[in-house]
């Protein structure tokens, strides 16, 4: 057993996994994932509710967006829809001031994601006048989520899996490059985008088998609060995957890639 333990430990160190775990602690991965979930719930969700309410195609509103992202179906999807769906008149009752506040909150969410990427790549924080990048990223993300929901009724099976995977990789690939202001090469960002999308696929499968029955149980036992807690737990998972996928891409580059061609005039410094 001791020999097996030494072999496993040696293989672990040779693979560099201990470095990845240390880097995850350095960037406070779990803390950032929790912050991601909180901001998504209190700032991003209201913005998406307004966008979904204004959807001219009327494909079920925000609750359908959320159920589709979590991979819910059947009774769990109906429970989520009954609790979270806002009335269609929400777009008519949203004031100009409320719309501006939602936009500001959305930009704050984009700024949080940008800060996480900058920390992962050991880059200085972008100047304040680049806030337009955060706004543009939010618009692109909303469009990405919108097309994900719309394709649900157009294609299914392997075709939708291929389309969702390709669009997801493209969005997270472009999103890192855009929020980082082009300071990292496209080729260096691709592994992180692929890892992020793979993680989201895994999270969707986990959600299907775990959160689907849990939503119904929590709705019966705790009501709307129980459903919101499940949604918040899922959002923490999404945040963990978004930041963890980018971190894994950085680790792959440092461990197995071309360190001397990191997209700047010099390679990005190692994480502290």
Image (cartoon, helix red, strand yellow):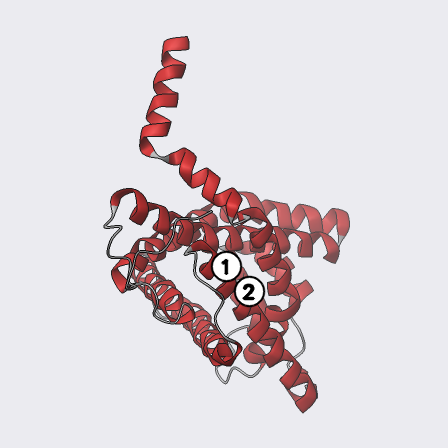
- Give residue 224's position: percent from left, percent from top: 73, 58
- Counting from the top left corner in percent of width and height, residue 237 is at 53, 50
Q: CA distance from mark 2 to mark 1?
A: 6 Å
Rendering coords of residue 192 (x, y %): 35, 54
Look at 46% across and 44% down and name the residue there: 23
SS at badge 2: helix
Taking 85 as reference, is 252 left or right? left
Q: Which residue is mark 1?
A: 116
Q: Are marks 2 and 1 in contact (CB under 8 Å)?
A: yes
Whether residue 97 sits left or right of residue 246 in the image: it is: right
Badge 1 element: helix
Where is mark 2, residue-wise? 112
Q: Residue at x 34, y 17 (%)?
A: 7
- Decide if residue 160 is in sight here: yes
Q: Residue furthest right?
A: 222
Q: Give the residue drawn at x 56%, y 49%.
A: 212
């Amino acid at each position: 057993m001791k020999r097996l333990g030494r072999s496993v430990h040696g293989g672990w160190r040779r693979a560099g996994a201990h470095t990845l775990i240390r880097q995850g602690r350095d960037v406070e991965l779990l803390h950032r994932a929790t912050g991601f979930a909180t901001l998504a719930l209190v700032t991003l969700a209201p913005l998406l509710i307004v966008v979904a309410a204004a959807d001219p195609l009327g494909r079920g509103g925000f609750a359908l967006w959320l159920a589709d992202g979590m991979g819910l179906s059947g009774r769990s999807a109906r429970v989520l829809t009954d609790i979270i769906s806002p009335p269609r008149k929400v777009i008519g009752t949203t004031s100009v001031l409320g719309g501006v506040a939602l936009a500001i909150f959305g930009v704050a969410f984009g700024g949080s994601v940008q800060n996480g990427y900058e920390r992962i790549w050991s880059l200085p924080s972008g100047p304040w006048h680049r806030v337009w990048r955060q706004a543009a990223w939010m618009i692109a993300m909303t469009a990405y989520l919108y097309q994900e929901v719309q394709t649900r009724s157009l294609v299914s099976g392997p075709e939708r899996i291929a389309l969702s995977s390709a669009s997801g990789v493209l969005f997270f690939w472009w999103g890192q490059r855009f929020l980082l202001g082009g300071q990292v090469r496209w080729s260096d960002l691709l592994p992180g985008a692929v890892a992020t999308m793979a993680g989201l696929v895994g999270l969707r499968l986990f959600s299907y088998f775990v959160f689907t029955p849990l939503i119904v149980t929590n709705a019966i036992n705790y009501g709307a609060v129980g459903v919101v807690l499940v949604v918040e737990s899922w959002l923490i998972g999404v945040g963990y995957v978004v930041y963890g996928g980018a971190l894994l891409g950085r680790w792959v580059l440092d461990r197995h890639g071309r360190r001397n061609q990191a997209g700047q005039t010099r390679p990005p410094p190692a994480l502290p």
